[in-house]
Amino acid sequence: MNWLMNLVVVVQILSAIVMVGLVLIQHGKGADMGASFGSGASGSLFGASGSANFLSRSTSACAAVFFCCTLGLAYLANSRELPAAATSVLDAPSAPLAPASGAAQIPGAAPVNVAPAVPAVAPGASGADAIPKQ
């Protein structure tokens, strides 16, 4: 199955390169208008609009191959079997976030108990006799 995906990617890249090249070498429709004023080569204002020539037909064929390869790659990517251990991020329960110290309280919400950074010392104790309160 992996070789098929690689083959479709190669065909898609080649069709994209060929399509870009074909678009770049085509003659624009607006170029006839500028040529008609100076040289009089064209009988009408925008030139004759005949049937599509070889370049435009081959560009549309390359575009069709490119879109088919894109749809094929999307199908191949979604049809792969997922291992049993693989789960979505959305399936995992979210862990509650601890509030940051000094965070603003929401009015009407229960206050958040945050432990102080420095332990409190019992009143009247000094030096080595100081025992932190718990």
Image: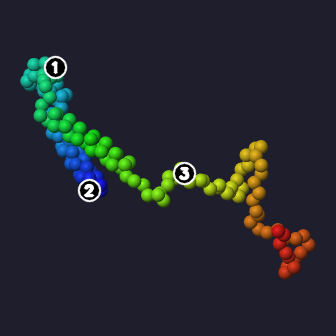
Label 2: how many Cα within 10 Å (few below 14, some 14–19, many 20+): few
- Would you say 17 lies left or right of 108 here? left
CB-based contact (under 8 Å), mark 2 and mark 3:
no
Q: Is residue 25 visible?
A: yes
Q: Amino acid at mark 2?
A: Trp
Residue 117's spot in the image, x, y percent? 74, 66
Label 3: how many Cα within 10 Å (few below 14, some 14–19, many 20+): few
- Would you say 122 lies left or right of 5 here? right
Residue 125's spot in the image, x, y percent? 89, 75
CB-based contact (under 8 Å), mark 3 and mark 1:
no
Quadrant of res 97: bottom right
Element under disc 3:
loop
Identity of the residue drawn at 34% across and 45% down: 75
Q: Could you tell me how far apart the alpha carbons at marks 2 and 3 are, in whole angstroms?
A: 32 Å
According to the picture, the residue beneath numbered tag 2 turns out to be 3
Answer with mark 3 or mark 1, whichever residue precedes in sequence.
1
According to the picture, the residue beneath numbered tag 1 turns out to be 45
Q: Residue furthest right?
A: 124
Query: Closer to the camera: disc 3 or disc 1?
Result: 3
According to the picture, the residue beneath numbered tag 3 turns out to be 91
Which of the labelled discs sits on residue 76, or is there none? none
Q: Amino acid at mark 1?
A: Leu
